[in-house]
Image: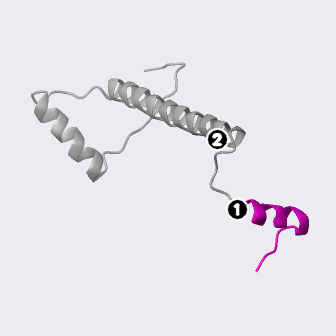
Amino acid sequence: MPTKHRRYAITETPPLRSVLDELREETGGGRVDLGELVLLGAHEKLLRLRAAADGTASRRRSLAARIRARDLPVDVEAADEVRRSGWARG
């Protein structure tokens, strides 16, 4: 059927077939709506990516606060030595 929308082909590889067969059994063996599965999967992927980004931003804010508070376990003398002499590669 002609359409202006993109089309995709999905191959039922063994892992995909396995999970689709489980879904078919759970739903009474009927047809699986792949469009709905793609929407659900895309939504879940977005949630995971956003959660990871939020976690990264949170850790950066926490580190910045610790740096400003000078609450880091660092060797000040070693840091001063590096500042004076530069990095040594060995």
Q: Quadrant of residue 4?
A: top right
Residue 21, by quadrant, is top left
For label 2, the SS is helix
Instruction: Read off the residue under disc 1.
Output: 75
* Residue 90 versus residue 58 in the image, above or below: below
Residue 87 in magenta stretch: yes
Magenta highlight range: 76-90
Q: Is residue 10 magenta?
A: no
Disc 1 marks which amino acid? Answer: Asp
Q: Which mark is residue 66?
A: 2
Residue 26's place in the image compared with 10, above or below, is: above
Q: Position of residue 9 (x, y in %)?
A: 42, 38
Residue sitting at 75 percent across and 59 percent down?
A: 76
Horizontally, is 22 left or right of 80 in the view?
A: left
Q: Residues within 10 Å of mark 1 (few under 14, many from 20)?
A: few
- Amino acid beneath label 2: Arg
> Which label was assigned to residue 6?
none
Q: Quadrant of residue 77?
A: bottom right
Quarter of the C terminus within the rendering: bottom right
Q: How is the image coloured?
A: one colour
